[in-house]
Amino acid sequence: MKFSVIATMLATLLAAGSANAAKEVGSGPNPFSDCGIGAALFSENKVLAVTSNVIWDVGSTAVTSATASPETCSGKKVEAAVFILNSYDNLIEDTARGEGEHLTALLNILEVEQSAQYEVLKTIRSQVAEQVATENFTTADKTEKSQMFYLAVVNAVKTA
Amino acid sequence: MKNIFLLICILFICKSTYAAHSISEADIERISKSDTWLKLLVYDGEESFITSREFFFATDGNKNPTSELIATLNAFSNSNTLQDIDDHPQCKFPGRYAWLKTQINLQSMSIEEQICPSFNSFSKDQHIDSVSLIFATGFLGNPASYYGHLLVKLNTTDSKINDLQNTAINFGADVPINENMALYILKGITGGYDSSFTQQQYFLHAGNYGESELRDLWEYELDLEPKDIEILLGHIWELLGADYNYYFFNRNCAFHMGQLFQLVIQEKLTDSSRLWVTPQAIMQNLANSTYKEKSLIKSIKYHPSRQSRLYQRFTMLTQKQKLVLSNLVNSPDTINLLSLEQFSLEQQLQVIDTLIDYFQFLRKADKGESDLNNKYYKQALMLRYKLPPGASSASFVSEQRPHLGRKPSLSSIQFIKSNRSVNFGKLQLRPAYYDALDAQEGHVAYSSLSMAEINLGFTPYKVFLKDLSLLKIESIRANLTGLPGDQNYSWYIDVGATQAYLGCADCSATKISSGIGYAFQSRIDFNISGFVGAGYMGRNISSENAYISTRLMSTWYINDKIAINLDKEFRHFQTSEKTHLIKLTTRYAWDTNTEMRFSLANDSVATEIGVSLGWYW
């Protein structure tokens, strides 16, 4: 059975993530630095490997080895990280507006209760505003920025 | 001991074949010949489209639906304990299982229903209650995308799952990365690639089409009954990863998506005898189909691309807002709240959201500081963060629904009066797709796309080739804002054969022409584009037949029914010969699928006036 890069990774790690369902968001490894997502996914031609009628097969081997230790890289966190990497621009714009479908999707992935979303959003917005205002925002690469965004979200969820 | 072992083996074999033996001959005949069974096996006539061996239980399953039925029932009755229950035949072929249990009593055949964790995770656990077919509009930047694309989205009722997280099903060719372009085109056309259905989360596609390729998405949610959704989901699951041969023209995403839905929809969405199938044709057939005596379409949703959102936001601004926006864009270092203080909060949000979309549209993110638009994008974002949260009111709409357009192929008959030769008739066949005058829903306005378009001239005494375009693309960018950097770089290519001069029936020549240029768009219904180009026009291979050219194209969509196009080209050959070709054409649409055209053409040799009647099919 053939899968694209994203489907392979998500299917493998989301399945593994069920063992970690009880762990709190924000505990455990950082999917960017510890699960190797940035290196595995970030490429010139993009993780958006499905273009039009074409399926790009970059090879599942690289993905599997870069995302080792499925017991410690929970499906939920990896799913959130993948989503952020692929939707970063939409996410910081939604955050600027304080609402939007990408932001809602991310909070759903991280299982933030509806009642807590407003406070979480407020915290995320102020932290991300600082990130956008930093000197190197324009020059930092997308994985770096995505990781900073991820950490802001995870911290906001933890403290909510 | 040996005897006990032998007895166990015999019992096992008997159990496995018992299932097939307990079904009547009449049922085998009925089921194996039924439309649904053949569709589940993806048959086309006598053979399946599926090329992967693993899709069939019987060695001749790809050609013998009866032996495949028997082998399937035997496989389903397998009660061996497997290391991974997801490898059980019922779990690998839930579509077949779901349908077969509506046709015969599987329990009486000792076929115990298995619990399939992976399939359940894909289907039941997601609470999928509807299915959408999504049309991505055409894109002239990639040959595979010229005619648009189709996706399936599985929609959940789970309120904790956002639409972006829904599962999307794609069909496409399996092309190696960095494939050579010529090989890509050749193998795509001649069946050189495998293809298959794959699944990803919808956000990947929404980002790719809407943000990277700037293509609108049109989502048609279907009104299917739960039991049909169950069979459809099961069939999608069993197709994931199964291999097909990919043919760009008629065994493409459009054809196989049409085939997929024909499993549960009685009406024909596509036909395997067609030489070409376009995604838009599938949408049109879908919209015209009924299901259980009602419309198949539950709702239609428009998902605008980044570019469409920018243009619509810009169009909705007042003149004052546009002026301020223009000033900010021209002097982006003045992007600050002071420049917006004359506006209400809502109006400020509208201007800033337009600015964000504008710089996002222009910038090259990977260029960092070397592209100043990245810096201005950041400034616009920071401005937004300074204001309170809350979206500006913007509702994005479009009337360009793909199913409303005309049919993809055009035939016409034309009568032409020439001042240099006898009058003649002309028959045109354009298999697909559009030109500047009839580009409509789902097409790129002001542009042209056609392959293998042929025009045959005829008189009472002869038939001759008037024009042949093997490939003709005029990619006209029609960007509306007029803001700096809203690029309108355009290009064209035309390869084939033609009569070297008007009024000539025996001066056929090879034609190759291409050019790059710029389009000017001051209003939504009028475009003028200028090009410089080069080409070749001649009967034999000689450098004397090469030329450089300047060209002007202009199109005016007067209203829904009338459009005018002017095309002027001046050629300077290597021999110093100079020629021109001027064409003025007016199109009148009688109705969606019928038209008349009035044309005037003039070159250095002759003038031709023509009137044609055309119909789309």
Image (cartoon, coloured by chain):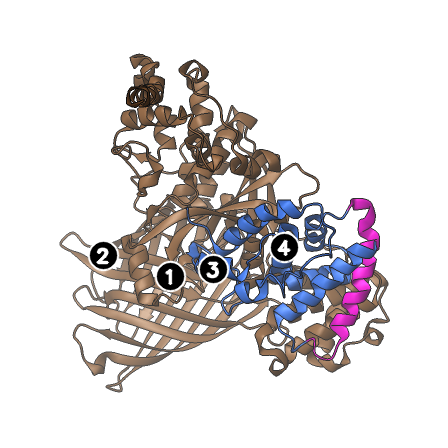
- Provide the residue designation for mark 3: B139
Q: Is residue A111 magenta?
A: no
Which label belongs to residue B457?
2
The percent position of residue A45, horizontal first and vertical second, equals: 49, 67
Dots 3 and 4: beta carbons under 8 Å? no
What is the distance, in whole Å, between disc 3 and disc 1 at their CAs?
A: 21 Å
Q: Nearer the viewer, mark 3 or mark 1?
A: 1
The alpha-carbon separation of the residues under discs 4 and 2 comes to 72 Å
Q: CA distance from mark 2 to mark 3?
A: 33 Å
Give the SS element for disc 3: loop
Tell me the magenta residue range: A113-137
User: Which of the two discs, 3 and 1, labels the residue nearer the N terminus?
Assistant: 3
For this orientation, the residue located farthest to the left is B461
- Cα–Cα gap, marks 1 and 4: 32 Å
At numbered mark 2, what does the secondary structure look like: helix, strand or loop? Answer: strand
Amino acid type, callout 2:
Gly
Q: Which residue is mark 1?
A: B176
Q: Chain of mark 4?
A: A
Q: Quadrant of residue B545?
A: bottom left
Q: Residue at x 16, y 74 (%)?
A: B540
Q: Amino acid at mark 4?
A: Thr
Residue A72 - label: 4
Between circles 4 and 2, the one closer to the viewer is: 4
Which chain hosts label 3?
B
Mark 3 closeness class: few <14, some 14–19, many ≥20 residues within 10 Å: many
Amino acid residing under circle 1: Pro
Q: Position of residue B427 (x, y in %)?
A: 27, 52
The colour chain B appears in is brown
* Chain the render paints blue: A
Q: Is residue B192 left or right of residue B147?
A: left
Most extreme residue toward the front is B1
Q: Secondary structure at mark 1?
A: loop
